[in-house]
Amino acid sequence: MSINSALLAGASGLISNSSALAAVSDNIANVNTVGYKRANAVFTPMYDSRGGDGSNYTAAGVNSRTNLNISTAGLLTGTTSATDLAIAGNGMFVVRESADATSADPVAFTRAGSFVADSEGFLRNSAGYYLAGWPVAQDGSVPVNPSDLNTLETINLSSIGGAAEPTSIMGINANLLASQTVSAQEATYDPTASATNMASGTVTPDFQRSVPFYDSQGGVRTLTISMLKSATPNQWHAEIHMDPATDVTTGATLLDGQMLTGVVAFDTQGRLDTANTTLPTTLNFLDSTNAAPLGATEFQWSAATGVAAQSIEIDFGDPNDPGGFTQYDSPSTLESTNVNGTAYGNFAGVEVDDEGFVFAKFSNGIIRPVYQVPVATFANPDGLQAQSGGTYTVTPESGTYTLNTPGLGSAGTIAAATLENSNVDLASEFTTLITTQRAYSASSKIITTADEMLDEAIRMKR
């Protein structure tokens, strides 16, 4: 009878509003939880049957289903930690429960980006999930794959050791005295003999300066530039040699640590004359382990140094630009040098840019990309299945994941030193709390009223 259906409808109202209260309670409790997504109770009527003429009505009650507003982003708030990460836009971080996870282990997705390094250096959020990223190769390439989880690694900061950067460019800004008197030793000068060259110290150069640079291990090495005014106008004999000479092993025509020899020429306006300059401008150090015979003008790091091959471009400047090598009637001087490379430096921290690149910073000023954080996107993020710790897993309703470079396509960008707040609006939750309580009370009144009506019907029999 209809009174019985009313009892059932009242009971369904109590159950559905209890579920709605639970959702509101979770929302209020998690108002300060990073990356939390609001739970929303959706009520659906369960129409059962009516009489054919509409004179009888059977109550079917109500059902409630709780949905998560996963696609709705919370406000982003700045922090002081470089490893606090948020996604500005669509997508989620890829995380795993274990730092040593393999492709066979489950993967999860989250917006909770409060990552910190654990005791082993792995980045883990407050729920205990480890952040995964693409490793950056030595050449700067990233193995980006939109669907292959095997290309991901758990980001580990303790695996980042120190770093050094070898010198590859050496800029020289110097002036040579145009009116320099030609030395008497110039008449017998010959760079191919120790008794008549500058590298050995036998011939006194008119201008000589030493320039430090860095090898492949960050060690500081020194090369010396020696110049002797030639009897030919506007030309200077030049030798570039290593100090000490024992740092290099040289070919047959190079002596006393020499690496480059030749002439530096200038035009009548004191500018570098590249057409008549014969001094090479590239230093090509062969590896210290090189066992092949050296050519006449080749050189390598000596075996005792134990360092790698290295190429250095020496920049004497452009004759049409200021600076570089010049010959004016002003005292010879080395104005400045511009040498890249750095000595060894310890790991000093990380930075993350909006493309998700995790840069390792070193005490010597080197900044090097080591990982890139992918952003996983879904066709229907609201269809994801919520799990513990603010994580989500794929369902048929959500569709499969796609791993994207941050900022590419529909994927959001990475915001470093930022966290995403809960998307809960307290004012709305308090309003919903009141209406839910009223609806629950009203459903209880349905039951008490139906009970009184049934009791009245029973008394009629008496």
Image (cartoon, rainbow, N blue to C red):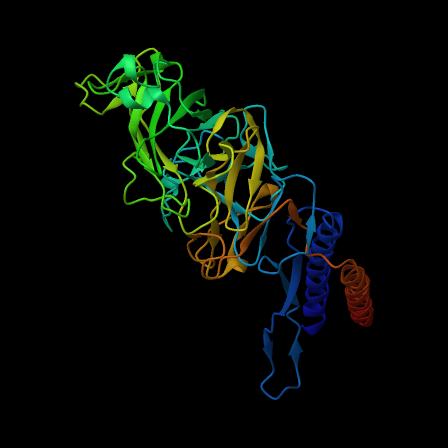
Direction bottom: furthest residue: 53
80 to 160, vertically: above or below: below
Q: Residue at x 25, y 16 (%)?
A: 193
Can you tell which quarter of the image residue 20 is in? bottom right
Can you tell which quarter of the image residue 396 is in? bottom left
Name the one closer to the observer, 173 or 416. Answer: 173
Q: Residue at x 39, y 14 (%)?
A: 244
Name the one closer to the observer, 165 or 76. Answer: 165
- Percent from the top left, x then y, of residue 276? 28, 42
- Percent from the top left, x then y, of residue 222? 43, 21
- Percent from the top left, x then y, of residue 357? 49, 44
Q: Is residue 31 left or right of residue 237?
A: right
Q: Residue at x 37, y 40 (%)?
A: 151
Q: Quadrant of the N terminus?
A: bottom right
Q: Is residue 318 left or right of residue 189?
A: right
- Percent from the top left, x then y, of residue 361? 55, 34
Residue 215 visible in image: no
Name the one closer to the observer, 41 or 294. Answer: 294
Residue 449 visible in image: yes
Name the one closer to the observer, 48 or 186. Answer: 186
422 to 215, vertically: above or below: below
449 to 307, vertically: above or below: below
